[in-house]
Image (tube, grey):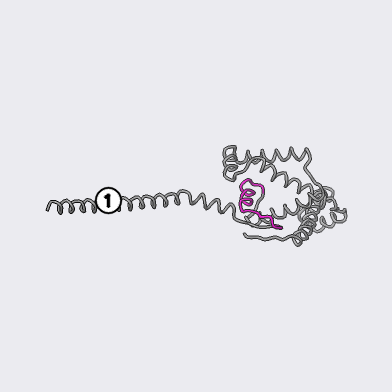
């Protein structure tokens, strides 16, 4: 009789222990699930942001242009426009940069001064603290921005060399433009506005030639736009 009582007590304690262990295990799993959910809530925006940054915005001749490149151009005011417009400008710039390399176009000492000035203007416009925070956010160094600015200036020098050098505005073209736009100049004589008109005609012709040149480069390149 004593043996049966002890056995029953033992089984009772075993059942109690089993229930306690099960409850503890379930509680541990519950706590683990809560921790996982909290981690997802806390870190999902950062993970999602990292994924977005590394999304492929475009591809040019097998070279991937991540979306972060578009955001960097926009954030640091290097290029204006919508995301898609900025992407097209990045592609055009890279096409022209390759051409500049073929012609051995590099920056000059004066260009280096201009590059530093552009960087300083960016710092002043955004403020030192915000500038440093943005560098950290996009995992950039100042040298990365300097290279972006340098490439823009090299492209501008190439355009001067390959496009603008061949643009000529004749006196006849200036006079014809003046006669076609007399209402815009009121009482001003041709001599007073000839330089202004020349600049307008020069810019128009330069843009036309540059667009024709870019059209040819685009046709010869493999370009994919994902925006």
Q: Residue 181's x, y, as percent? A: 78, 57
**The C terminus lies in which quarter of the figure?**
bottom right
Q: Quadrant of residue 213?
A: bottom right
Classify 10 Å Cα crowding around label 1: few (below 14), some (14-19), many (20 and above): few
Along the viewing direction, whichever of 43 and 31 lies nearer the viewer: 31
Is residue 102 one of those drawn in magenta? no
Most foreground residue, 160 or 34:
34
Q: Nearer the viewer, residue 188 or 142?
A: 142
Give the left or right position of residue 37, taking residue 130 as reference.
left
Is residue 76 located in the magenta-colored stretch of the structure?
A: yes
SS assignment at label 1: helix
Name the residue located 80 percent from the left edge and 56 percent from the top edge.
Answer: 205
Residue 8 pos. (x, y %)? 18, 54
Residue 43 appears left or right of 150: left
Residue range in magenta is 60-78
Residue in the picture at 57% in, 41% down: 133
Which residue in the rendered view is the most extreme toward the left?
1
Q: Which residue is mark 1?
A: 20
Residue at the image point whose x is 64% and y is 50% from the top? 69
Horizontal arrangement in the rendering, residue 61 relative to residue 8 (left or right) = right
Q: Nearer the viewer, residue 181 or 202?
A: 202
Q: Is residue 132 above or below residue 53?
A: above
Q: Position of residue 221 (x, y in %)?
A: 74, 60
Instruction: Residue 36: give x, y in percent of width and height.
Output: 42, 51
Single out the residue that lies furthest toward the bottom.
219
Q: Quadrant of residue 132?
A: top right
């Amino acid at each position: 009789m004593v043996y049966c009582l002890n056995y029953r007590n033992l089984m009772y304690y075993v059942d109690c222990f089993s229930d306690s262990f099960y409850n503890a295990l379930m509680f541990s799993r519950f706590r683990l699930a809560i921790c996982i959910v909290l981690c997802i809530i806390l870190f999902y925006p950062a993970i999602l942001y990292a994924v977005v940054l590394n999304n492929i915005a475009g591809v040019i001749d097998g070279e991937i242009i991540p979306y972060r490149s578009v955001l960097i151009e926009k954030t640091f005011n290097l290029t204006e426009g919508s995301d898609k417009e900025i992407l097209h400008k990045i592609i055009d710039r890279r096409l022209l940069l390759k051409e500049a390399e073929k012609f051995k176009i590099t920056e000059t000492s004066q260009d280096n001064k201009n590059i530093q000035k552009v960087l300083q203007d960016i710092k002043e416009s955004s403020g030192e603290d915000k500038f440093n925070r943005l560098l950290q956010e996009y995992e950039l160094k100042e040298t990365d921005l300097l290279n972006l600015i340098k490439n823009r200036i090299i492209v501008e020098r190439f355009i001067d060399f390959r496009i603008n050098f061949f643009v000529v505005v004749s006196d006849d073209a200036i006079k014809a433009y003046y006669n076609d736009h007399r209402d815009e100049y009121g009482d001003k004589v041709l001599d007073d506005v000839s330089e202004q008109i020349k600049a307008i005609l020069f810019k128009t012709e330069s843009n036309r030639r540059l667009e024709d040149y870019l059209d040819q480069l685009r046709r010869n390149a493999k370009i994919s736009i994902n925006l």
